[in-house]
Amino acid sequence: MKRIAIVEDEAAIRENYKDVLQNQGYSVQAYANRQQAMQAFTTRLPDLAIIDIGLEDEIDGGFTLCQALRAMSNTLPIIFLTARDSDFDTVCGLRLGADDYLSKDVSFPHLLARLAALFRRSELAANAEQSHEQLMERGPLSIDANRMQVSWNQHAIELTVTEFWMVHAMAKHPGHVRSRGDLMQEAKIYVDDSTITSHIKRIRKKFIAVDANFDCIDTVYGMGYRWDSHG
Amino acid sequence: MYHPPIGLRTKTLVLSLFLLGLPWLGYKYVWEMEKYLRYGQEQTLEGTTQAVATALHERPKLFDKQASFLKQVEKGRDLYAYPLNGPIQLDGKLSDWDEYSHKAMDYGSDNRLFLAENSDSKLHFRHMVGKYGGYLYGFFEVSDAQLVYRGRNSLAVDRNDMLAIATLAPDGLFRRYVIANLQDGWLSAFELPEDPSLDTPVRPENRIQGQWRKTETGYNIELRMPLEMVGSKLGFAIHDVNDARSRKVEAIVGTSATDSADNLGTVLVPSPEIESIIKGMGHNSSRIWVVDIHGRVLAKSGNLHDGGGVWAEAENEPQTFWTEFQQKYLNPIYYKILTRPPDDFVDTLKDSTELQGSHIQQALAGELASTWRLTQDKKAVVLAAASPIWIDDTVMGAVIAEETTHGIRTLRNRALEKLFNVILIVMSIGTLSLFFFASSISSRVRKLRDQAEQSIDSQGRIRNAIVPSPVRDEIGDLSRSFANVVGRLSQYTHYLENMSSRLSHELRTPVAVVRSSLEHLSLQPIDTEAMKYVDRAQEGVKRLSLILSNMSEATRLEESLSNAEADQFPLSKVISGCIAGYQMTYPREQFAFTAPSEPMMMLGVPEYIAQLMDKLISNAIEFHTPGSIVQVKLLQQAKHAILTVENLGPLLPENMAEEIFESMVSVRSQAAQQKPHLGLGLYIVRLIAAFHGGSIRAANLADGTGVVFTVTLPLQGS
């Protein structure tokens, strides 16, 4: 049984999520603030942590907690689930090593899908088995949908789940324009256009960090984005 | 109340005009000073007269006794020997006397001493006496129709035209002389016996020299005699004989009767002793007269033109740059106001023989006195002081000293020049410093005004804070309080602007609570009747969260704009790409798009431009009349791209053209609200346009059929 920790100061939400997750067959521990959570984590780490950024009187308590968790484990999946959806917060959270960043608008089915995906990725990362059925090759790009791994010229690119699905959606049909709506559906998030834009920008940056000449994601103004293998 | 548009600087300049009162004050002061100087000059001059008088007191022989005891002198009878400027050529021509001719007296019927019966003698003559170098000179210009010379064989000298001279000699004896010529030429003068009844000449008198000369109207006699012959009494008489045969004297015209000493008039010969005394004073800065009790001039020295009194001391200042400058530029201005004492005034008294004036009368009455007078041509002021000369407790004459006030005036002028110089310097420094002070104040105030105006843009948004001035005065205070006000205002504005994002943030949690609870509820087995309400509630919550994400969109855009990185991109390509996208997105709508072929490179973030287009197009689609064409035009004007989006449909309300770009303003009718609408779209458009250094305007189409949005974006210099 997967153990999921929820750190959320709003009791109603905490309880709702806890109920939903428990119904899904996860074992859930809920904490109202950072101190409680840290106490529990020092004794035993959960298999996945869902953290709110603002915790009671600590505005950025979630970030602090995320840092501490990352220090304890490199592989523990961490999801930020928060009402704060500004670019700044998103970037901050992801930089601190969170695996995904969801707004509280996310519906339960979506949340559950995310959890499943993360668990799958961490499991696959743990088991070194390679199945090539889900392997997609686009020139230097290779996507392993099972392990949710993306690599460019054999270099692994660390993407969040959201980013992974976006790259996946574009690379599935190279040359086809995918509108922002398509990308949102693929990534199972509901955000506005500018958030998609900033996601794309982050993806580009991550590829460019590996290969300075990377230019495969085309912006088709007014329509969306497309994967261009000849970039 | 009317406020004229006058700046601080102008006001200060006007106020500094009060400095012009300084020269007036200075002028008044110098004027006062001049009064004291004049008073001083009076005193000095009186002192001078007293000093001279002191030298003349109790010296009776300087004064002519005879005349001094007369009650009054009679002009014509009492003669006055004018001091002559040079010797007279004894030639019978009167040209030598021209310069004195105005002093000559006419003797005619009023001075007749005798007229024979039945005589129609018109005898009259002009005459004057003068004194030069120990001689008494005189001339007689006689008008006589019949000149009768002395007969060649006649012993008598009185049976012809002749001149009789009588005097009380200095030795106290009464002497008579006669001049009777045989012909023109050197005078023949004879002494007559004392007894007036005897007319036989005693002996020729060759000390009386001169010429007899016939003229057209009569004859001239020009003569001289040594002064020692002449006492204080003197008389001349012309005897006229017209009939050469009968040789009867028809008329006698004279200065006074010549028959006895008592009938003689006096003669005043200016005393050389007095003159030497006065000269000995060595005082030439003023003119000094000595007059006798009748006001007749006994002696004179000095010249009014020579100096303006003791006050005028020529200062020989070294020629510096400053003095040159003053002489060249300042003095012409000063002397428009000031007057230079003239050197060419007319001195009417120059050769006077009789002086009059209140000061002389007072002096002759025994008191010191002084007067001021203008010269006849009004060019100079003459100060005269007089003091009496005493002999045995009687006033025998007066010493008069005269000076012009030129010295004082020169002094005054010099003082005023200096004063004006100082005042000019003070005034110019004062005015300049006031001007600069006012300029600095007004420029500071203007700067503050500009800052205040720039701190808030036309829509009332805080653009930039006012930098508080560090200067610790009232304007600095004002600037600081402005800065405070703007700061507080911007804080409040900021608070208001962030309201939407914080609101959305704050609402998100309760919405999440409701939403997750509803999801739980929907997962519960409940009957369909209740399920209906759960679905509705979920629908509502969805809308709510859409509103919330819209609300935070603008804030997030602002944030991302603040750290966006600008690149070069082709604007026309971006816009045409967008239009192609819209034709796919809105398959039922029709777009008309025109753009120039140039790429129109600009610096910015293409995604934002695309977002701007999205908002404009969705706005146009929402409002357009169904079935009409949305017109998009892109064109280049100089260094700007002009993007217009036109749609037919309802017009903008009056005065809303600016406000529709504000956050949370929507001008659409409530009926159009199928979707949540916060009016943030156009606000986002404005943000993006402003980020790119452009602007946006909304206007109704000229023909009133719809609305046009115009975005102006700067292009890169190609």
Image (cartoon, rainbow, N blue to C red):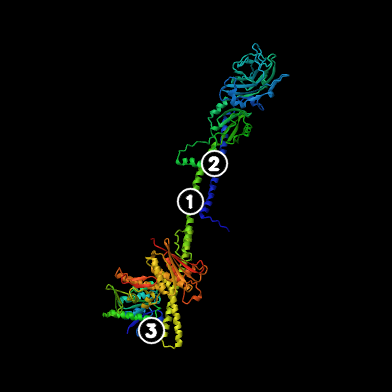
Image vertical order of residue A110 relative to residue B490, above or below: below
**Element type where label 1 sits in the image:** helix
- Label 1 close to label 3 by CB (< 8 Å): no
**Element type where label 3 sits in the image:** helix
Residue B329 seen in the figure:
yes
- Label 1 close to label 2 by CB (< 8 Å): no
Residue neighbourhood size for the residue with mark 1, other residues' Cα within 10 Å, grouped as few (<14), some (14–19), many (≥20): few
Along the viewing direction, whichever of B130 and A90 lies nearer the viewer? A90
Q: Amino acid at mark 1?
A: Ser
Residue neighbourhood size for the residue with mark 2, other residues' Cα within 10 Å, grouped as few (<14), some (14–19), many (≥20): few
Classify residue B411 as left or right of residue B260. left
Image vertical order of residue B512 relative to residue B607, above or below: below
Separation (CA) of disc 1 from disc 3: 83 Å
Residue B286 seen in the figure:
no
Question: Nearer the observer, disc 1 or disc 3?
Answer: 3
The residue that label 2 is drawn on is: B336
Which mark, by number, is residue A20? 3
Residue A90: percent from the left, percent from the top?
37, 73
Q: Are marks 1 and 3 on the same chain?
A: no
Q: Are marks 2 and 3 on the same chain?
A: no
Question: Nearer the observer, disc 2 or disc 3?
Answer: 3
Q: Amino acid at mark 3?
A: Val
Q: Amino acid at mark 2?
A: Lys
Classify residue B638 as left or right of residue A216. right
The residue that label 1 is drawn on is: B433
**Element type where label 2 sits in the image:** helix
Location of residue B274 by image quarter: top right
Sequence-wise first label, 1 or 2:
2
Residue neighbourhood size for the residue with mark 3, other residues' Cα within 10 Å, grouped as few (<14), some (14–19), many (≥20): many
Image vertical order of residue B203 relative to residue B460, above or below: above
Separation (CA) of disc 1 from disc 2: 28 Å
Residue B403: percent from the left, percent from the top?
56, 34
